[in-house]
Image (cartoon, coloured by chain):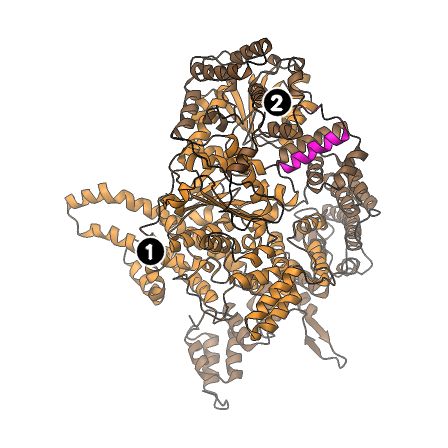
Chain colours: A orange, B brown
């Protein structure tokens, strides 16, 4: 240990863990790959950490699910509904046809149907929409697309090209999850309305896992929060309506954010338009939250296993592609990451530093299980092979895969000085040594390290400091443009529009809200006075929110990641995600009472409603009351899902996350880019 | 609202039913003509038939209705178990900022009932709505004149509602400016972007742009939808006019500047950027756009020149390190790196010289040093690297200085595979002793470690370190030598 350089805050438990693990992982793969005595010597090396790492089984990993935690509803029904409707729609164009599928609908489609299903319903050839002239010879073309102008324009070109060629075909567009008038208008303008029939495939919800459902609409974030286009509001309402009809009726809804409120209204109207029949509710409570209520959380580096895998390898529709560096072979493999993967299921929510201990324990157990063979007679061996071997092999495969992934992630992170990056992030969250953070970011930009990373840090700086000082803004922007291209002027304009990266207005006066917060802090203790003043000078809502909700634990306290005490563990104990903290607080208080200051700082738009009627539901304490559906409008991260799972375990609740898409810092920021034609 | 409809029908938003009810709808029409008053009863009759006939019917295309539709229907109905109907309504919430804190005290039924509309009219339009256009083959659709009389009376609210539900609607009757605006406001109140845009498309066609723009100024939500729509359909010119009339000149300038991305040819792109210089950018952005133009102008010159030099094989540097890509459209810093790589030492006067680029684009000392260091280290030109840090004072002594910490310099050099001898020199310049040792250990600069421990008079550490180096190696001997040196006064 004494050899390990621990330059930055050596006392900090967070960095301590990180470094320690890098050592372990390098030694570790041999443990699983060897079948013989070599293991012993490796065990010796690991032993030094064993005291710390191996007891992780008594930590969160072994956190047995409370007996009273309710069962989750079965969401596979949603897949069946979607599949059956698609088949029905395909049958609306009888006979053989070629099917063109929008690129980002392909993975969702894969999750609910396969090629055989399509072939069985007269789909001849399958194509991906590539915005190029087509080569199909079929007399019938079917297009399965998102309602986007660009795609519809391309279809118009295809149809008009056929017309010019004197070719007659039947065309059908299936919009998913719904069509837009703007698309139909385009068909009309292009003179092909009528030549093309249109339909809607109401594929609103794709279950990605037992407790994650995605709308698979990554454009929701940009359309809604940047462009101010409410085209997806009704979609969100309809998705909620679908869940309500199948798993409801809901008895309570809470929410915060403008879009949440509108989605609630849309849902309510759809409920009113339809008809309610009494049934046993499986989901009782709903929480709606806009992504722009908390933009800090998705911009932080993820350090729980699943989040880290998403940050590095990008999980797409519940599936990840591991390259040769992970598989230690020459080919890549695609792996489904969900609760079906027993190894993954146990490490997905863990802080990365805890994962190694777990994997090493697993490897050891596996070794012991294999070793049992040695003393066996033929009969025992037979039983072993028929009963245990398959399971062991499967586990072996998964284990090597996740060890490979961990190792590869470790290498990459070490290379990019992850330690220092995390230190900067934590300082920003704490509001500590901001000048040092700025020069770190500056150097990051100067060295032309990843553009998105630089932008992420700039946005975090702006969000936590409530904007940059004009001279910092000007200088950092100029350097950014020099390093990454002047056309990012357009990106800066977008970031400003959304409030992700702004300049403090010179001479900005204190808003009412901030002075109130100031008073509040002052009232507490006289000693906090200076603290309050400095916060007022910075005019930072994040800081005030952080204090009000205790989002940032004191940095001088050690945080034991083995036994997380709160949701902060997902960020190494440095920060409790605001989004999840709000959910916790509102559920605890059964509403927003007592959170007035907080909601004011978040621009309001909070609500809490209970089903009217005879209110019979509210009184019945069924399991459904402890199942909470959280809908993120604009995307949520795997880290937030992990935090909610933690909260669920603590409180005996089960959370179901519905999100417009799984997001992370890179996806969120890439949606802001405008520097391409 | 009509409550007679089966749930599953509502859920699939009527898309599945229609195909089979075509014949019935035809009947429906005939009946409608016979007696308008009988609409209600007929409707319920028709609906029942729908239910019964569904299985045996053929779809409009003539195909027998197969098992799929059944399964769709079955699945849809299986998800609801039947039971008594209860009031499950939720309160409408005000979308204006102020909100009820706690809603448990809300009485909802009143709100719910308050929304009911006049029965006969509703059911009429409802039955009509069943003929939603989407499932008809267009040629089979009824001529509009046949039902014109009935549709034209919908209020803005009803029209918006029908649009949201994907039913037949008509916007033609909204002819006065007031009606148009009422319709627009109603769409905005419904929070459905799809409908807002649909109404805006209608207004775009039926209002002069001056009138439309003027009305949009006070309607922020509608305005943002309009801007987004124009962006999507790429109506650049109109968008520019809109921004102009809104006095959003910076947005307009950026919007026009964005167009350069669509120009492939570098000379045309440069000329376009030149034309952007007069756009009303903010002062800061104007400087950046000016830089952009200057940069591309120079890149074109450098590219032409270097391409020629490279192909003629005159310069060694291009032979040794062939260019991987053209320098066109690269960022300023990349251009500087390129210049430090291929054009180091050129006089200030040439466009391609590092000094000229540095001056033209006001590059900071720190930035210049970092880039230059990277390029020279890549070429293993350690002499150049050395010169970057060497300063002479007035007495002629040389000293190494850097605007960034030497631990950073070490890091960059190491990433460029600098040999230990070079690294060592810079590790030695790190001021903080602890940091120096940890860096030295990381990069195996034994001399630095040994000397530092010696200077710290730390005998214990030196002994520990002796255990780590190879026995008999030169490092080992050096440590032995120092340890046996009786002149040193060890602190431990």
Of the residues tagged 1 and 2, which is closer to the observer? 2
Q: Residues within 10 Å of mark 2 (few under 14, many from 20)?
A: some
Q: What number of labels is visible?
A: 2
Magenta stretch: residue B174 in it? Answer: yes
**Marks 1 and 2 belong to one chain:** no
Residue A502 or B312: which is nearer the viewer?
A502
Q: Which residues are magenta?
A: B170-190
* Location of residue A29 (image quadrant): bottom left
Where in the figure is residue A574, as x and y percent of width and height?
A: 50, 63
Write down the chain letter for disc 1.
A
Q: Residue drawn at (42%, 21%), measured in percent from left and top?
A: B70
Residue denoted by label 2: B168
Q: Is residue A209 above or below residue A563?
A: above
Disc 1 is placed on an element classified as: helix
| Quadrant (top left, top right, bottom left, bottom right) of the N terminus of chain A | bottom left
Q: Chain of mark 2?
A: B
Residue B61 in view, yes or no: no
Residue B361 circle label = none
B456 above or below B157? below
Asked whether residue B384 appears in the rendered view, the answer is yes
Percent of width and height locating residue A617: 40, 42
Q: Quadrant of the rendered structure where residue B119 is?
A: top right
Where is residue A510 drawn, in percent x and y?
Answer: 68, 63
Type of secondary structure dominating the magenta stretch: helix
Q: What is the number of the mark on residue A62?
A: 1
Residue A96 magenta: no
Residue that protrudes farthest toward the right in the picture: B278
* Kind of element beneath mark 2: loop
How far is mark 1 from mark 2, CA to CA?
58 Å
On screen, residue A170 versus residue A351, left or right, reads right
Give x and y (percent) for residue B48: 45, 16
């Amino acid at each position: 240990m004494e050899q390990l350089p621990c330059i930055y805050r050596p006392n900090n438990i967070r960095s301590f863990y990180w470094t320690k693990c890098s050592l372990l992982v390098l030694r570790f793969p041999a443990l699983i790959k060897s079948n013989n005595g070599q293991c012993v010597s490796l065990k010796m090396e690991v032993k030094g950490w064993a005291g710390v790492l191996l007891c992780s089984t008594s930590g969160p990993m072994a956190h047995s699910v409370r007996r009273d935690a309710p069962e989750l509803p079965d969401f596979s029904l949603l897949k069946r509904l979607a599949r059956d409707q698609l088949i029905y729609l395909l049958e609306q164009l009888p006979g053989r046809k070629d099917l063109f599928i929008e690129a980002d609908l392909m993975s969702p489609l894969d999750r609910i149907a396969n090629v055989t299903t399509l072939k069985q319903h007269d789909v001849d050839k399958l194509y991906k929409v590539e915005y190029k002239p087509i080569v199909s010879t079929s007399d019938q073309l079917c297009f399965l697309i998102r309602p986007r102008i660009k795609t519809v324009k391309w279809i118009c070109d295809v149809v008009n090209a056929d017309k010019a060629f004197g070719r007659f075909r039947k065309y059908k567009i299936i919009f998913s999850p719904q069509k837009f008038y703007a698309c139909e208008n385009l068909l009309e303008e292009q003179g092909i309305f009528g030549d093309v029939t249109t339909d809607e495939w109401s594929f609103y919800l794709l279950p990605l896992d037992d407790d994650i459902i995605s709308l698979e609409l990554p454009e929701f974030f940009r359309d809604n929060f940047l462009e101010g286009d409410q085209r997806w509001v009704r979609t969100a309402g309809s998705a909620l309506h679908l869940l309500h009809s199948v798993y409801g009726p809901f008895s309570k809804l809470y929410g915060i954010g403008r879009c949440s409120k509108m989605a609630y209204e849309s849902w309510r109207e759809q409920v009113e338009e339809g008809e309610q029949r009494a049934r046993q509710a499986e989901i009782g409570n709903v929480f709606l939250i806009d992504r722009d209520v908390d933009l800090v959380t998705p911009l932080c580096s993820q350090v729980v296993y699943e989040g880290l895998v998403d940050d590095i390898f990008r999980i797409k529709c519940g599936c990840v592609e591991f390259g040769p560096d992970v598989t230690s072979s020459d080919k890549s493999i695609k792996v489904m990451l969900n609760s079906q993967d027993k190894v993954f299921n146990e490490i997905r929510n863990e802080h990365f530093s805890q994962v190694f201990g777990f994997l090493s324990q697993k490897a050891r157990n596996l070794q012991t299980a294999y070793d049992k063979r040695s003393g066996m007679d033929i009969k025992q061996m037979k039983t072993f092979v028929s009963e245990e071997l398959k399971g062991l092999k499967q586990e072996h495969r998964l284990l090597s895969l996740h060890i490979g992934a961990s190792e590869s992630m470790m290498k990459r992170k070490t290379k990019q000085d992850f330690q220092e990056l995390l230190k900067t992030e934590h300082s920003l969250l704490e509001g500590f040594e901001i000048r040092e953070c700025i020069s770190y970011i500056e150097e990051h930009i100067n060295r032309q390290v990843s553009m998105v990373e630089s932008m992420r840090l700039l946005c975090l700086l702006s969000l936590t400091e409530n904007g940059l000082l004009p001279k910092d803004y000007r200088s950092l922007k100029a350097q950014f443009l020099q390093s990454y291209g002047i056309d990012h002027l357009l990106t800066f304009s977008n970031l400003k529009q959304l409030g992700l990266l702004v300049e403090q207005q010179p001479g900005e006066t204190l808003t009412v809200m901030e002075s109130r917060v100031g008073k509040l802090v002052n009232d507490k203790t006289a000693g906090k006075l200076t603290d309050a003043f400095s916060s007022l000078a910075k005019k930072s809502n994040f800081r005030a929110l952080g204090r009000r909700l205790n989002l940032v634990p004191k940095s001088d306290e050690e945080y034991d990641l083995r036994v997380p005490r709160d949701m902060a563990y997902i960020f190494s104990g440095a920060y409790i995600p605001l989004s999840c903290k709000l959910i916790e607080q509102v559920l605890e208080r059964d509403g927003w009472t007592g959170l007035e200051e907080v909601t004011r700082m978040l621009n309001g738009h909070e609500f809490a409603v209970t089903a009217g009627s005879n209110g019979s539901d509210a009184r019945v304490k069924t399991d459904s009351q402890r199942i909470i559906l959280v809908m993120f409008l604009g995307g949520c991260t795997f880290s937030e899902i992990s935090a909610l799972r933690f909260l669920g375990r603590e409180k005996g609740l089960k959370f179901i996350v519905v999100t417009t898409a799984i997001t992370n810092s890179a996806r969120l920021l890439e949606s802001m880019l405008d520097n391409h034609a | 609202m009509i409550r007679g409809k089966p749930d599953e029908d509502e859920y699939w938003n009527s898309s599945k039913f229609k195909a089979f009810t075509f014949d019935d709808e035809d009947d429906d029409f005939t009946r409608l003509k016979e007696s308008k008053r009988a609409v209600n009863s007929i409707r319920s009759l028709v609906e029942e038939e729908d239910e019964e006939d569904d299985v045996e019917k053929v779809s409009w295309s003539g195909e027998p209705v197969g098992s799929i539709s059944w399964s769709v229907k079955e699945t849809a109905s299986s998800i609801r178990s039947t039971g008594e109907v209860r009031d499950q309504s939720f309160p409408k919430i005000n979308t204006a900022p102020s909100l009820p804190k706690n809603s448990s005290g809300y009485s909802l039924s009143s709100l719910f009932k308050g929304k009911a509309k006049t029965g006969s009219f509703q059911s009429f339009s409802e039955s009509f709505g069943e003929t939603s256009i989407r499932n008809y083959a267009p040629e089979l659709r009824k001529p509009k004149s046949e039902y014109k009389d009935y549709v034209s009376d919908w209020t803005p609210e009803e029209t918006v509602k029908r649009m949201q539900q994907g039913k037949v609607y008509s916007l033609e009757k909204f002819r006065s400016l007031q009606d148009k605006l009422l319709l627009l406001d109603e769409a905005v109140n419904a929070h459905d972007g799809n409908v807002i845009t649909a109404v805006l498309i209608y207004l775009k066609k039926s209002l002069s742009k001056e009138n439309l723009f003027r009305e949009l100024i006070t309607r922020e939500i509608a305005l943002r939808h309009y801007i987004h729509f124009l962006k999507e359909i790429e109506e650049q010119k109109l968008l520019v006019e809109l921004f102009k009339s809104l006095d959003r000149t910076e947005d307009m300038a950026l919007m026009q500047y964005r167009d350069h991305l669509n120009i492939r040819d570098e000379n045309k792109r440069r000329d376009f950027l030149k034309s952007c210089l007069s756009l009303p950018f903010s002062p800061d952005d104007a400087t950046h756009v000016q830089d952009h133009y200057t940069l591309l102008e120079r890149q074109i010159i450098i590219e032409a020149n270097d391409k020629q030099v490279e192909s003629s094989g005159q310069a060694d540097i291009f032979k040794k390190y062939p260019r991987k890509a053209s320098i066109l459209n690269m960022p300023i810093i990349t251009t500087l790196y390129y210049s430090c790589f291929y054009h180091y030492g050129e006089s200030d006067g040439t466009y391609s010289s590092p000094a000229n680029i540095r001056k033209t684009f006001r590059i900071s000392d720190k930035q210049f040093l970092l880039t230059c260091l990277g390029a020279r280290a890549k070429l293993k030109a350690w002499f150049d690297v050395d010169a970057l840090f060497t300063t002479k004072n007035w007495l002629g002594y040389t000293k190494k200085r850097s605007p960034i910490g030497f631990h950073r310099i070490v890091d960059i050099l190491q990433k460029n595979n600098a040999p230990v001898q070079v690294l060592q020199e810079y590790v030695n310049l790190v001021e903080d002793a602890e940091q120096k040792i940890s860096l030295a250990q990381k990069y195996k600069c034994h001399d630095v470690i040994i000397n530092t421990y010696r200077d710290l008079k730390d005998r214990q550490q030196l002994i520990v370190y002796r255990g780590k180096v190879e026995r008999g190696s030169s490092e080992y001997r050096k440590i032995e030598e120092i340890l046996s040196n009786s002149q040193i006064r060890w602190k431990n």
